[in-house]
Amino acid sequence: MNQFRNELKEEDEASLALLVTRTGVFSDEEIAIARDLVRETRLGMPGADYLFLIADGIAQIDGYTCYGRIPATDNRFELYWIAVDPGSHRHGLGRALLEASEQDVRRRGGTHLFAETSTRDDYAPARRFYKANGYSFYAEVPDFHADGDGLAIFGKRL
């Protein structure tokens, strides 16, 4: 069983931004958002109700999730980020992080976990990952992010 930490450190802002960059699929704007969520949460800024699970490796962070309660819903949560360093792919870390996040959501009274991803071809592994982990495909919004880059919505009853 993997052990993950949920307390953020000052250096996590840069470390998680570097991890997200290494995945090779996120835009500069998305990387900046990932960095901002860490900073806002660590500093306790109003509205920063994000939860993190971090998998520390020997020399770097190997993966993480960021999730939280969806405002104005009845015990629904969203998985905002899941990222695993490319060097740690195919070793079960993503699945372990997702399962630990789901367990934490259940512990907090959550009944559903939703995840959104892109419909671009380079996001096909992410869509397969959600399906392989019991998530149902709920909807697609064409051209959501940009022309030719739609939004795919997945969810799971916990």
Image (spheres, rainbow, N blue to C red):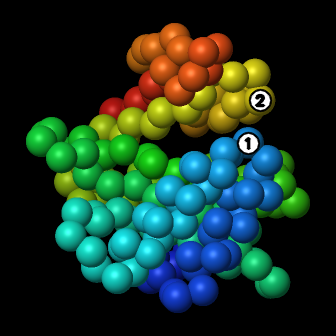
128 or 139, which is in the foreground?
139
x and y percent of residue 125 in the render?
Answer: 74, 32
92 or 5, which is in the foreground?
5
Q: In this rendering, would 33 be left or right of 71?
A: right
Name the residue tied to disc 2.
Answer: 122
Q: In this rendering, would 22 be left or right of 106?
A: right
Q: In this rendering, would 96 be left or right of 88?
A: left
Label pair 1/2, CB-CB below 8 angstroms: yes
Mark 1 burial class by Cα count in 10 Å: few <14, some 14-19, many 20+: some
- Residue 3 visible, this angle: no
Say whether disc 1 or disc 2 marks the residue closer to the N-terminus: 1
x and y percent of residue 126 in the render?
Answer: 66, 34
x and y percent of residue 113 in the render?
Answer: 37, 40
Q: Residue at point 18% right, 46% down?
A: 71
Q: Residue at point 64% right, 66% down?
A: 17
Name which residue type carries label 2: Asp
Circle 1: element type: loop
- Residue 119 visible, this angle: yes
Figure check: 45 above or below 117: below
Figure check: 93 above or below 127: below
Circle 2: element type: helix
Could you say which quadrant of the image residue 148 lies in?
top right
* Quadrant housing the C terminus: top left
Could you say which quadrant of the image residue 59 lies in?
bottom right
Name the residue tied to disc 1.
Answer: 25
x and y percent of residue 99 in the render?
Answer: 52, 52
Name which residue type carries label 1: Val
Q: Which residue lies furthest to the right in this view?
A: 87
Mark 2 burial class by Cα count in 10 Å: few <14, some 14-19, many 20+: few
Picture mark count: 2
Q: Residue at point 52% right, 11% down?
A: 142
Disc 1 to disc 2, how far (Cα)?
7 Å
